[in-house]
């Protein structure tokens, strides 16, 4: 068996596993689908009985009885069809839910690097669009295959008992039709894969463009965005054109062969009637069965289309599910019940990947518990990287990072990050209420604790003045809040979490002076009596730090208190003068 066949077999096995929790619904779905098929098979048989026996014998009671039986059977069939149509789709929706839950849950475990390399629009496409199509396949696939098999095999058994040559001839056409469908499968798979890729790209372009709509309009660059979107939109349109071309050939070919099947039955069957090998009732039954067999053939054709689209989406689903987090716990990972807050970087070397330069070279740093350390320096020297490494968003290439003399690689990720809080330059605000955004720092906190955290962050009075107070919705990404308000909400989260170690990454760099002063007061409160790492651009925010480290490409260039570094008149002195007195160093 080829590698590709093994891969397809593995994909199908993974797909089938999602039916396990819903096997009861699936079982009744297939039972009722079988009963529907059997009812459909009885109509030509009863028709033959009426034409060959009841009408020639003038037996009106027999005709009435058969008709009454058929009405009863089709009444039951309506009930079966309701179950298959309703519960079959419910099963598909539940499988879609299970897959989306698994996919979103798995995304939460993936390392930070995955999200820096994977486009948001592509992830959204796999979470929503792909799984919607998979839902349709998961509903229709088992019943379409089952009904089609029963109808084709049932028709064959009944017809072969009437006339072997005519039946074989009919099924030769059916087999040719099946072969044609299989041959088109490969082309359809390729075309649907292309459509899926273009769909992800158009999602990405749309998400990027709409998220930056304010900047676009401020620069009056709408024409540029329209042109960029039109490029991916054209590619998307053309991918569908190619797909429709394949589908058109597929449908035209199957339609032609379906017509050949009817012509074969009518012409050859008529000739057999002339030869008295079959009678008129038999011919009518063959004609009815040729049309009945088109139902499963059409089901199979539709199934092939849905399957190719759905399985392409499922493969993309599996691609993400097969992604392994780079950073995980081990069996030996420990939980830290109490953290004093001592942080130590020992000879750390780090680069994001082989194609990028080394960010940190033999970097060492010690932070005593309860102390506040500030990092300053030009962009690109690794200040934010240091905080990312402490949180284990990435692992160091060489060296060690320790908390309370314990290597962070030996600490469970949940335990490590539960003891570290972070306030970033771009405060992350989620869709929801003010209360929910603060509570995010400690989901099991009491109402009183949330209020106290807001007061400590100097935002309680502002929240109380909102139309709905703490229940006020902040809009998407906190669009209804100012930059300073979002930052204070973020700081309130940090107060609520009450971590042993706090990271402040450019927490005031994008604020006006008044907002900065308010935030700075909140920062001083939240960092009191806890180990704090401040990454700062504005030097006014770090004047009271216990130690300031000036970071350069070569590592730590200077260190000391604010006053000590000014007295040295080195790099920090130049930065300070340039920022506050207009002095630009040589």
Image (tube, helix red, strand yellow):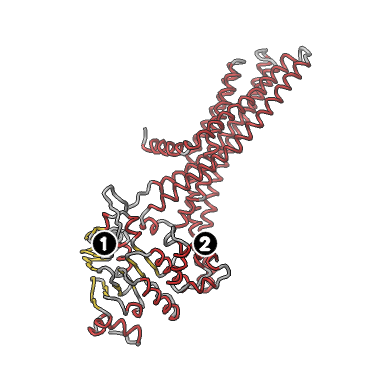
Query: Can you give x and y, in whole percent of width and height, for residue 444 in the image?
Result: 44, 58
346 up-or-down from 11: above or below = below
Q: Tell how many labels.
A: 2
Query: Can you give x and y, in whole percent of width and height, for residue 210 in the image?
Result: 52, 64
Nearest to N terminus: mark 2 or mark 1: 1
Query: Can you give x and y, in whole percent of width and height, for residue 122 in the image?
Result: 46, 54
Quadrant of res 49: top right
Front residue of 169 and 534: 534
242 up-or-down from 47: above or below = below
Quadrant of res 276: top right
Q: Secondary structure at mark 2?
A: loop
266 up-or-down from 275: above or below = below
Q: Residues within 10 Å of mark 2 (few under 14, many from 20)?
A: some
Front residue of 463 and 119: 463
Instruction: Tell me the quarter of the image containing the N terminus.
Output: top left
Quadrant of res 296: top right
Query: Can you give x and y, in whole percent of width and height, for residue 39 in the image?
Result: 64, 25
- The answer to whether residue 426 is seen in the rendering is no
The dot on residue 145 is: none
Left/right of residue 190 with respect to residue 114 in the rendered view: right
Identify the residue position indicated by label 1 in the image: 403
Left/right of residue 113 with respect to residue 348 in the rendered view: right
Identify the residue position indicated by label 2 in the image: 432
Q: Secondary structure at mark 1?
A: strand
For the point 25% across and 69% down, the residue is 368
């Amino acid at each position: 068996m080829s590698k590709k066949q093994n891969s397809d077999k593995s994909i199908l096995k993974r797909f089938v596993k999602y039916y396990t929790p819903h096997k009861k619904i699936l079982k009744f779905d297939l039972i009722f689908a079988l009963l529907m098929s059997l009812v459909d098979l009885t109509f030509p048989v009863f028709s033959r009985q009426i034409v060959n026996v009841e009408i020639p014998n003038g037996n009106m009671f027999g005709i009435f009885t058969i008709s009454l039986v058929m009405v009863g059977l089709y009444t039951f069939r309506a009930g079966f069809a309701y179950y298959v149509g309703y519960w079959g789709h419910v099963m598909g929706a539940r499988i879609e839910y299970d897959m989306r839950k698994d996919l979103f849950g798995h995304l939460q475990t993936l390392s930070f690097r995955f999200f820096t390399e994977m486009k948001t629009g592509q992830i959204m496409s796999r979470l929503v669009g792909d799984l919607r199509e998979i839902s349709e396949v998961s509903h229709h696939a088992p019943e379409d295959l089952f009904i089609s098999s029963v109808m084709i095999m049932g028709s064959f058994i009944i017809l072969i008992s009437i006339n072997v040559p005519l039946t074989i001839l009919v099924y030769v056409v059916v087999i040719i039709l099946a072969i044609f469908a299989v041959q088109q499968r490969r082309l359809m798979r390729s075309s649907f894969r292309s459509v899926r890729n273009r769909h992800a790209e158009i999602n990405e372009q749309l998400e990027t463009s709409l998220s930056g709509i304010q900047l676009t309009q401020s620069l009056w660059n709408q024409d540029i965005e329209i042109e960029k979107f039109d490029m991916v939109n054209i590619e998307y349109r053309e991918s569908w054109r190619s797909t429709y071309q394949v589908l058109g050939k597929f449908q035209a070919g199957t339609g032609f062969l379906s017509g050949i099947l009817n012509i074969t039955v009518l012409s050859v069957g008529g000739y057999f009637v002339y030869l008295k090998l079959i009678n008129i009732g038999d011919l009518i039954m063959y004609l009815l069965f040729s049309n009945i067999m088109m139902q499963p053939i059409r089901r199979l054709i539709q199934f092939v289309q849905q399957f190719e689209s759905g399985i392409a989406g499922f493969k993309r689903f599996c691609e993400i599910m097969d992604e392994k987090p780079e950073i995980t716990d081990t069996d030996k990972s420990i939980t830290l019940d109490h953290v004093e807050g001592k942080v130590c970087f020992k000879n750390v070397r780090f680069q994001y990947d082989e194609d990028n330069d080394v960010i940190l070279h033999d970097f060492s740093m010690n932070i005593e518990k309860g102390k506040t350390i500030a990092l300053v320096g030009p962009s690109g020297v690794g200040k934010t990287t240091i905080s990312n490494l402490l949180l284990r968003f990435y692992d160091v290439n060489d060296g060690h990072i320790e908390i309370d003399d314990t290597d962070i690689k030996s600490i469970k990720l949940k335990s490590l990050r539960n003891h570290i809080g972070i306030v970033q330059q771009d405060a992350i605000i989620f869709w929801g209420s003010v209360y929910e955004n603060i509570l995010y720092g400690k989901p099991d906190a009491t109402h009183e604790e949330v209020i106290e955290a807001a007061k400590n962050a100097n935002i309680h009075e502002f929240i109380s003045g909102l139309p709905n107070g703490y229940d006020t919705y902040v809009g998407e990404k906190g669009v209804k809040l100012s930059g300073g308000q979002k930052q204070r909400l973020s700081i309130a989260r940090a107060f609520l979490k009450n971590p042993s170690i706090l990271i402040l990454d450019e927490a005031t760099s994008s604020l006006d002076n008044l907002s900065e002063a308010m935030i700075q007061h909140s920062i001083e409160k939240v960092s009191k009596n806890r180990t704090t790492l401040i990454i700062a651009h504005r030097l006014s925010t770090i004047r009271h730090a216990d130690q300031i480290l000036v970071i350069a490409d070569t590592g730590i260039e200077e260190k000391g208190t604010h006053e000590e570094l000014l007295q040295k008149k080195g790099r920090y002195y130049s930065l300070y003068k340039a920022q506050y007195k207009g002095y630009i160093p040589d």
